[in-house]
Amino acid sequence: MMIYGLDRASSIIKLIKKVNKSLPHAMAMTRVLSTRFMDIMTHPTARDVILQCLILFPRKPNEVLYEKVILHFQDLAIHEVGCRSLIDCIALIHGDQRVRLINKIADVSDYLSYDRHGNFVVQNLLGLKNKGITKKITCCLQNQFMGLAVRKEGCLVVEKCMEASDDGIIAVAKKIIDCRRGAVRLARNRFGNYVIQAVLEKTKERGFNSLYDAIVRQLEARCRASIGRTQGGIRSTQDAYIRDQSSLHEWIIIFM
């Protein structure tokens, strides 16, 4: 079944719409499509054929496709087109197979978070706000937060962890505090800087005052040391600003 051209894909989608009420025809079609699953789901046009099956067919004909998604999820996740297909599948698959799929993805979220395509899949899972999955991802990433925070793709995952749950905020904040000069290292990095701003905002917003204060102390110590090396005119302006504790963390980020 050659479906890689736009016209051919459109023709097959029309056929899917015609046979969607016929269980035998639907099952025959999904069986055929499953034999070329990866080729189809990593093609920008052809992938719509399988997605239409997932949308229009009942669960039974689609089960063979569900199993293919579970089998190939990791290869899909790190592919430019495949990651989009996987995200669509997460939304369209139902029942026990969906539970298996999202748990398998969460189990390798540390690996996927470092990938330029896979990180979007992890972000998508965190966006579901599923407590069990969020907890699993947070645990999987807790020793990776510092490394991820200084990477373009990784910093977004760290921020998503904090958006997904209070446990995520606490885990990220504690990792920064426990790492020697962790807050300073992140603040001086172009991507880590965004993470520091986010963790300060969220710890303060959620009332995690001890965590907020611990991070600010790390940064404040660095800032005061730096101010001491500046010339008098600049120093007086910065000292006046730093006395405003409500804006201290914003000033620290700018100064870094």
Image (cartoon, grey):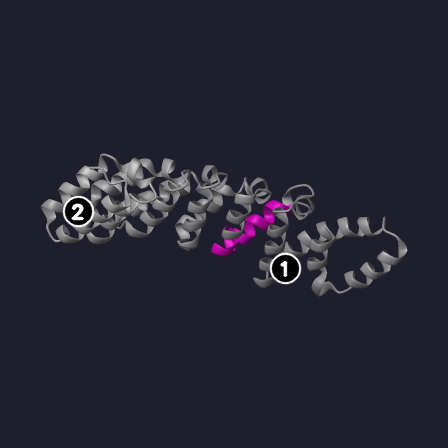
Answer with mark 2 or mark 1, whichever residue precedes in sequence. 2
**Residue lying farthest to the right in this orientation:** 232
Q: Is residue 66 left or right of residue 141?
A: left
Query: Can the viewer see residue 165 in this picture?
Result: no
The residue to which callout 1 is attached is 209
Q: Where in the figure is residue 237, as x and y percent of width and height?
A: 83, 61
Q: Position of residue 63 (x, y in %)?
A: 21, 43
Taken as a whole, is the magenta stretch helix, strand or loop? Answer: helix
**Residue at x-position 76% and y-position 48%:** 222
- Identity, as a three-letter code, of the amino acid under mark 1: Asn
**Place of residue 75 in the rendered image (x, y in percent of width and height, measured from the top left):** 37, 35
Q: Which residues are magenta?
A: 161-177
| Left or right side of 124 for 101 | left
How crowded is the residue under tag 2: few (<14 C-alpha within 10 Å), some, or many (20+)? few
Distance (Cα) linking label 2 and label 1 = 52 Å
For the residue pair 160 and 212, the one nearer the viewer reads as 160
Q: Quadrant of the N terminus?
A: top left
The crowd level at tag 1 (other Cα within 10 Å; few <14, some 14-19, many 20+) is few
Checking the image for residue 60, the label placed there is: 2
| Figure check: 61 above or below 237 | above
Q: Which mark is residue 141?
A: none
Asked if the stretch drawn in magenta spans residue 170, the answer is: yes
Asked which secondary structure carries label 2, the reply is helix
- Amino acid carrying label 2: it is Lys
Q: Residue at x 72, y 58 (%)?
A: 251
Name the residue: 13% across, 50% down.
Answer: 19
- Which of the 4 quarters of the picture holds residue 203? bottom right
Could you tell whether 15 is left or right of 137 in the image?
left
Q: Position of residue 87 (x, y in %)?
A: 37, 48
